[in-house]
Image (cartoon, helix red, strand yellow):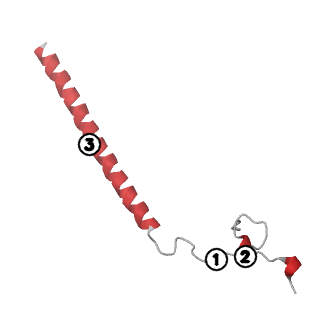
């Protein structure tokens, strides 16, 4: 009976050790993913900062910038 209990304890210890190793690798991969995303978002050319004039109803147009629209009634 003592041998059986010792084997059960060894199995539990090896499962615990494997779980701790798995969580350590998961945490390291999460840290690597977070730093890679921060480096990606810190790139200077990633964000648009210039004014974009809408050229029609397309998915890439930027609506809400109505001060850039042409007022046809007041053209001379």
Instruction: Give the secondary structure at mark 2.
Output: helix
Tell me if mark 1 has few (under 14), some (14-19) or many (20+) residues whose alpha carbon lies within 10 angstroms of its own: few
Where residue 7 sits: x, y (%)?
Answer: 17, 23
Tell me if mark 2 has few (under 14), some (14-19) or many (20+) residues whose alpha carbon lies within 10 angstroms of its own: few
Is 76 drawn above or below residue 10 in the view shown? below
> Is 27 on the left-hand or right-hand side of 76?
left
Between residues 23 and 35, which one lies in front from this camera angle? 35
Q: Residue at x 51, y 75 (%)?
A: 45
Q: Which residue is mark 1?
A: 51
Where residue 75 sits: x, y (%)?
Answer: 86, 83
Is 71 drawn above or below residue 18 in the view shown? below
Tag nearer the camera, 3 or 2: 2
Q: Which residue is mark 3?
A: 21
> Is 40 on the left-hand or right-hand side of 6?
right
For this orientation, the residue located farthest to the left is 2
Mark carried by residue 24: none
Tag nearer the camera, 1 or 2: 2
Q: Which residue is mark 2?
A: 68
> Is 8 on the left-hand or right-hand side of 41?
left
Tell me if mark 3 has few (under 14), some (14-19) or many (20+) residues whose alpha carbon lies within 10 angstroms of its own: few
Q: Quadrant of the N terminus?
A: top left
């Amino acid at each position: 009976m003592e041998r059986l209990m010792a084997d059960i304890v060894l199995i539990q210890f090896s499962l615990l050790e494997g779980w701790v190793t798995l969580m350590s690798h998961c945490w390291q991969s999460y840290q690597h993913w977070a730093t890679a995303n921060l480096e990606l978002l810190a790139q200077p050319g990633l964000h648009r900062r210039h004014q974009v004039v809408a050229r029609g109803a397309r998915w890439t147009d930027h609506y809400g910038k109505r001060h850039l629209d042409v007022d046809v009634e007041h053209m001379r």
